[in-house]
């Protein structure tokens, strides 16, 4: 038997999905260890070994692949705990990190503070050089000046250096010269060179991304080096892959070289998994939501492709590397309830995390959290949380909510807990609405795939708020991102700027730039063990109407690229612009401008095969556990409702809300407006009762 392991390190829990050659899978979950995430990683794998009565060393010899998503770089950015970083840039623009693009995020808020740069001003050193937008040298690089600035950084004992010169996307000669000097003078420093990382226009996007990459690079390197050493000490001889923000995976060294590409490493697995679960029922589109212990993530998938962006931000800092377009807010099981200065009840974004955790964990936490509210409302079983490994203290949850929420607002305990539950649901619904509307979509048109340990307990209320009629809760929902990691391909993204009117583009230059990117991508994938037969490419262009400020990324068929069919390319652009912005200038014959060429190079990996279940009929009685008092939203009363062991539900089983489905790692609260049917993969299809006939016909064999 050979195994594959997907690992997602979250703020509260570290999730594992173990799959075998036989198609069976197992879920594991351990508390995260923020000080050293590798401790939780090895602990989870050790539990897998113990279950099989094997030593860790013997078990790892049966593991062919480990795919790992990490929040190391994310947390370093959010908490400003990256390394001491220097920046070398063109004389006159050292303050670009603070000037940004000259647009204040909240235009009418005079008290709104700028985002804090990751490089302090005294470490942002100007170098005498200048290249114009056409790549011509205006001022030659002053080598002595560059050496002096490097000496200054050396004296400051920086751990990383970012290099970003004006217009280096058009001519990277100066950056290459400085990179050579840095390697000679600071051989142990982590280097981030903009022309290697992001050779495209928009100076702020490039300098911010390059600085972020330097800021978190050594952090990721230390973590992955330590993890690799620990795995090697246990004689792991399989393949270790790292999840990146674009929904693909890469070898550890490639992740280290482009550390900023892992800023969305954990959440990126969710949309990838969403494609599989909706595809099992014949859908091509969906919205994925993932509510964990600390955060809530939402993403849109259309035609089996997750939405992407190249203008992502983390902690208000721009990262222009391609990443899945995931909206993340501070809403999770550990989100803390509090009362603001106006006397209004709020939820999050601050979280109790894994230490000290919610009050009911009885690990020293005293703040009322979402999990405490779920427990008080009857949605969680005190003795069955995490399969009984974590005993929840209901009295401490009641005390925290009573003292911090109920008494100050003059509410009774149930009203306070219900208020916490409702507010966090509305917050999450707003995040789903935001990501859908920005894609030019109506959330009511999409099935919602629900993930995260806390997600299924809140999904019906989110769906009701948005009038979404259908949800799919995978049996692996609590480790959804870990599942997505095992379904990911190796991916590398490349970009080159070529600014011209589309109909005036030179075919020779256009194809030359794409050929350069494709050659580089193939070499990298081959170094990761992928043969040519498993390599494919996706072509895209950044296009806009002449005179516009923003461009639109448009995927273009390979034939139109290779034939330089400018008319067909423009015809692809117009409807996409219309969907996103509500208008098209096709009839006005407005010229289309080309900004960037993009290439996504994909190396196909072997995917786990999940076993399908035999149809077992509609009756779910074999899974019934008991009745439990739970709060019914809308009716504002507690009722006795049935509780089912979700893992005993079989393909075809049907039940009506209100009900509670319990698994070892998650609980789903089904409200009275919804019913449930189990599909062939064991996923729970939750649907508005008005859709009964349609859903039954779709799922029944």
Image (cartoon, rainbow, N blue to C red):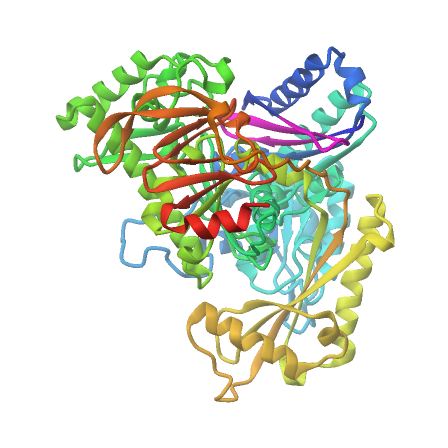
Q: Is residue 23 magenta?
A: yes
- Placement of 72 over or under 168, stated as above or below: above
In which quadrant of the rendered view does residue 65 lie? Answer: top right
Of all residues, the one furthest to the left in this rendering is: 410
Residue that appears at 55% across and 45% down: 700
Predominant secondary structure in magenta?
Answer: strand
The answer to whether residue 530 is visible is yes
- In the image: residue 252, left or right of residue 298: right
Q: Is residue 133 magenta?
A: no
Residue that appears at 57% across and 75% down: 573
| Residue nearest the viewer, comparing 537 with 364 | 537
Residue that appears at 86% across and 55% down: 533
| Quadrant in which the N terminus appears | top right
- Placement of 104 over or under 423, stated as above or below: below
> How far across and how far down the image is residue 394, in percent?
33, 14
- In the image: residue 540, left or right of residue 320: right
- Placement of 390 over or under 240, stated as above or below: above
| Residue nearest the viewer, comparing 389 with 322 | 389
Q: How many marks?
A: 0
The answer to whether residue 352 is visible is no
In which quadrant of the rendered view does residue 503 lie? Answer: bottom right
| Residue nearest the viewer, comparing 446 with 101 | 446
Residue that appears at 68% across and 20% down: 45
| Quadrant in which the C terminus appears | top right
> How far across and how far down the image is residue 440, in percent?
44, 64
The stretch in magenta equals 5-26
> How far across and how far down the image is residue 427, in percent?
34, 43
Of all residues, the one furthest to the bottom in this rendering is: 588
- Placement of 381 over or under 25, stated as above or below: above
> How far across and how far down the image is residue 85, in percent?
59, 40
């Amino acid at each position: 038997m050979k195994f594959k392991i997907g690992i997602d390190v979250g703020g509260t829990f570290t999730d594992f999905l173990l799959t075998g050659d036989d198609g069976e899978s197992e879920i594991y979950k351990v508390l995260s260890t923020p000080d050293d995430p590798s401790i939780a990683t090895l602990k989870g794998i050790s539990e897998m070994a113990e279950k099989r009565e094997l030593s860790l060393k013997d078990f790892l010899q049966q593991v062919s692949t480990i795919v790992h998503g990490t929040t190391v770089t994310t947390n370093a950015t959010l908490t400003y705990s990256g390394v001491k970083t220097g920046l070398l840039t063109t004389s006159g623009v050292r303050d670009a990190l603070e000037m940004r693009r000259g647009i204040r995020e909240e235009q009418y808020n005079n008290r709104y503070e700028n985002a804090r740069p990751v490089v302090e001003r005294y470490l942002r050193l100007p170098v005498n050089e200048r290249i114009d937008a056409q790549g011509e040298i205006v001022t030659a690089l002053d080598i002595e000046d560059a050496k002096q600035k490097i000496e200054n950084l050396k004296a400051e004992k920086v751990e990383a250096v970012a290099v970003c010169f004006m217009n280096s996307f058009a001519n990277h000669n100066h950056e290459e010269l400085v990179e050579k000097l840095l390697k000679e003078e600071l051989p142990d420093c982590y280097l981030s060179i903009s022309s290697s990382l992001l050779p495209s226009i928009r100076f702020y996007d490039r300098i911010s991304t390059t600085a972020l990459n330097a800021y978190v690079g050594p952090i990721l390197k230390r973590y992955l080096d330590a993890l690799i050493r620990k795995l090697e000490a246990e004689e792991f001889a399989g393949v270790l892959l790292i999840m990146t923000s674009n929904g693909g995976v890469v070898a550890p060294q490639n992740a280290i070289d482009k550390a900023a590409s892992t800023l969305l490493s954990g959440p990126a697995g969710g949309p990838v998994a969403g494609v599989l679960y909706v595809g099992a029922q014949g859908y091509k589109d969906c919205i994925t939501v993932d509510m964990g212990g600390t955060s809530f993530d939402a993403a849109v998938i259309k035609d089996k492709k997750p939405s992407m962006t190249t203008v992502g931000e983390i902690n208000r800092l721009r990262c222009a590397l391609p990443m899945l377009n995931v909206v993340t807010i501070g809403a999770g099981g550990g989100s803390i309830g509090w009362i603001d200065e106006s006397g209004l009840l709020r939820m999050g974004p601050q979280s109790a995390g894994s230490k000290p955790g919610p009050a009911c964990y009885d690990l020293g936490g005293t703040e009322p959290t979402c999990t405490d509210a779920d427990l008080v409302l009857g949605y969680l079983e005190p003795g069955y949380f995490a399969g009984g490994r974590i005993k929840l203290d209901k009295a401490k949850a009641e005390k925290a909510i009573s003292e911090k929420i109920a008494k100050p607002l003059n509410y009774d305990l149930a009203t306070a807990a219900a208020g916490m539950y409702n507010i966090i649901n509305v917050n999450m619904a707003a995040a789903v609405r935001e990501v859908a509307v920005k894609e030019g979509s109506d959330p009511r048109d999409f099935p919602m795939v629900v993930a995260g340990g806390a997600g299924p307990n809140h999904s019906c209320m989110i769906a009701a708020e948005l009038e979404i009629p259908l949800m799919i809760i995978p049996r692996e929902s609590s480790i959804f991102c870990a599942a997505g990691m095992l379904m990911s391909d190796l991916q590398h993204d490349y970009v080159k700027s070529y600014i011209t009117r589309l109909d005036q583009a030179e075919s020779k230059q256009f194809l030359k730039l794409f050929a350069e990117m494709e050659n580089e991508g193939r070499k990298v994938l081959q170094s990761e063990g992928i043969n040519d037969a498993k390599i494919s490419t996706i072509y895209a262009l950044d296009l806009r109407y002449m005179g516009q400020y923003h461009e639109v990324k448009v995927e273009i068929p390979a034939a139109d690229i290779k034939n330089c069919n400018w008319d067909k390319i423009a015809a692809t652009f117009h409807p996409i612009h219309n969907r996103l912005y509500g208008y098209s200038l096709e009839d006005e014959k407005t010229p289309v401008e080309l900004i960037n060429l993009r290439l996504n190079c994909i190396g196909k990996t072997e995917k786990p095969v999940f076993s399908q279940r035999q149809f077992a009929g509609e009756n779910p009685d074999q899974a019934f556990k008991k009745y439990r008092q739970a709060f019914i939203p809308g009716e504002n009363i507690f009722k006795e409702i049935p509780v089912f062991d979700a893992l005993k539900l079989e393909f075809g089983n049907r039940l009506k809300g209100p009900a509670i489905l319990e698994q070892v790692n998650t609980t789903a609260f089904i409200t009275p407006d919804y019913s449930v049917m189990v599909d062939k993969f064991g996923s729970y299809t939750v649907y508005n009762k008005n859709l009964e006939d349609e859903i039954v016909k779709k799922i029944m064999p």
